Image (spheres, rainbow, N blue to C red):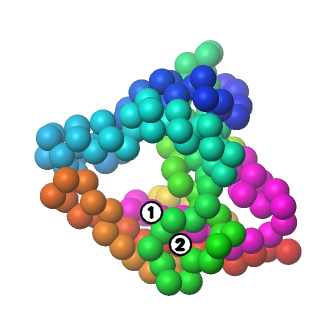
Amino acid sequence: MELRRASPADAATLSALSVACFTQTFGHLYPPQDLQAFLAEAYAIDAWAQLLADAGYATWLIEDDGAAVGYATAGACSLPHDEVQPGDGELKRLYVLHGHQNGGWGGRLFDAAMQWLERDGPRTLWIGVWSENFGAQRFYARHGFERVGAYDFVVGDTRDHEFILRRAPTR
């Protein structure tokens, strides 16, 4: 397995991988038509191409024998919280396909994203996490993130209760 920074050439790979990861993790929560509409918009190749070309964001891939099996994306915080400040960073997405979990690769993706987010020094970092993803909440708590708010993540007619986590700058 190999960890590497993604480039604009990886847009199609990330589109397919993000659809697979989201569907494995959350697909059971949504009516099929809502899920398909969300995936087609949020994880479209063009959406990934724009994100990968934006210097304000960074994405990393985990590959197993050349096949992408996990990814993380980081950038400026866009969570709906009154205390978000310009310059705050956010771990936007972190997913590993089910068959490749529990090998430490999610931790390596997390570490890469955190190092990139703090490349210019410590700053406040944010994460949004599904309220029922207890494993992720425990993982982020071990890394100093605390729950400071909540919001609704909308997929079609479904509203998921999400927690907003924050970590103060570490010196």
Residue 17 % position (x, y): 45, 30
State how far apart marks 1 and 2 are (Cα): 8 Å
Tally of marks: 2
Q: Is residue 114 shown in magenta?
A: yes
Question: Is any part of residue 98 visible from this angle?
Answer: no
Tell me the quarter of the image containing the C terminus.
bottom right
Residue 82 % position (x, y): 50, 84
Question: Is any part of residue 116 visible from this angle?
Answer: yes
Secondary element under disc 2, as helix, strand or loop, is strand
Q: Is residue 170 shown in magenta?
A: no
The residue identified by callout 2 is 165
Secondary element under disc 1, as helix, strand or loop, is strand
The foreground one among 71 and 132 is: 71
Circles 1, 2 touching at the beta carbon (< 8 Å): yes
Q: Hey, what amino acid is under mark 2?
A: Leu
Residue 68 % position (x, y): 55, 25
> Residue at coordinates 48% horizontally, 78% vertically from top-left?
81
Tell me where residue 122 sits by quadrant.
bottom right
Q: Residues within 10 Å of mark 2 (few under 14, many from 20)?
A: many
In the figure, is residue 22 to the left or right of 14? left
Residue 73 % position (x, y): 58, 47
Tell me the quarter of the image containing the N terminus.
top right
The residue identified by callout 1 is 129
Task: Point out the tag, 1 or 2, that comes first from the N-terminus.
Answer: 1
As drawn, 75 above or below 160: above
Work out which residue is located at the far top of the displayed protein and give it: 65
Q: Residues within 10 Å of mark 1 (few under 14, many from 20)?
A: many
> Residue at coordinates 47% horizontally, 58% vertically from top-left?
135
> Residue at coordinates 47% horizontally, 64% vertically from top-left?
128
> Residue at coordinates 77% horizontally, 54% vertically from top-left?
115
For the magenta stretch, what is the residue range?
Answer: 109-134
